[in-house]
Amino acid sequence: MKINHSDNTNFNALFVKQTQVSRLLRNGKYEPQNVSLVKINPKNAGDIWALDTVANNWEYDKFSTNIFNNAYQIYKGTEQPKYHIYALTTQRNNLRKLNADKILGLMDLTRLTKRETYISHLQTKPDFVYSTKPKIKGVGAALINAIKETCTTIRLTSLPELSVKRFYKKLGFVPYTETSATKLIWKKNFDKA
């Protein structure tokens, strides 16, 4: 779906906090890189355009498309604004003109209660996911860790692949039903026990 826009589109991403990922150096080692966590405003045409651009650029990724579709339904007024959409970007200033090419990852979530969250979709830029030596790593973890600071419980349904399960286990998630290993939960202080 193409969104009409101009080069002067005003974006309305809200800066949430600075966080870090790891950036690959020429010598093959990683170093910390500061990045911005921003909250996308799904009622703003510029933010919708940025999500549309990401969904088109990450063409083989269905999660970024789902995040865009959720935001677009809110933008059109056909969906209540229940989704909270976050982006991690290398852009550190002028966030009113968010550069879609600098977005490293996206996440949309629903607040179940004031302190409980359900992550609907989490997607890192595919170039980083499907590389044995990605230029940037730690994007998904940075998104989740930022949300951990705002709630006591996070629920999600993960993909069944072993690498995905390992990723969430490393972040302190455990299955919350005996019948499904893909329904996961994280609770504050649960991963420290």
Image (tube, grey):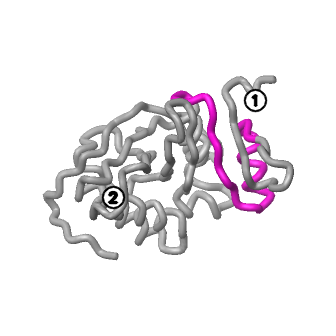
Is residue 105 rendered to the left or right of residue 182?
A: left
Q: Quadrant of the N terminus?
A: bottom left
Please give the name of the residue rendered at 19% of the width and 67% of the height, measured from the top-left corner. Answer: 5
Question: Please, which residue is most extreme toward the right here?
Answer: 178
**Residue 24 makes an appearance in the image:** no
Determine whether the residue tagged by mark 1 lies in a helix, strand or loop: helix
Distance CA(mark 2)–CA(mark 1): 35 Å
- Say the numbered circle drawn on residue 48: none
Front position in the image: 10 or 29: 10
Given the image, on which type of amino acid does mark 1 rest?
Asp
Given the image, on which type of amino acid does mark 2 rest?
Ile
Location of residue 93 in the rendering, given as x and y in whole percent from the top left corner: 29, 38
| Residue at mark 2 | 74
Front position in the image: 13 or 184: 184
Determine whether the residue tagged by mark 2 lies in a helix, strand or loop: helix
Is residue 183 highlighted in magenta?
no
- Say the numbered circle drawn on residue 191: 1
Front position in the image: 90 or 61: 61
Q: Which residues are magenta?
A: 149-173
Is residue 86 rendered to the left or right of residue 130?
A: left
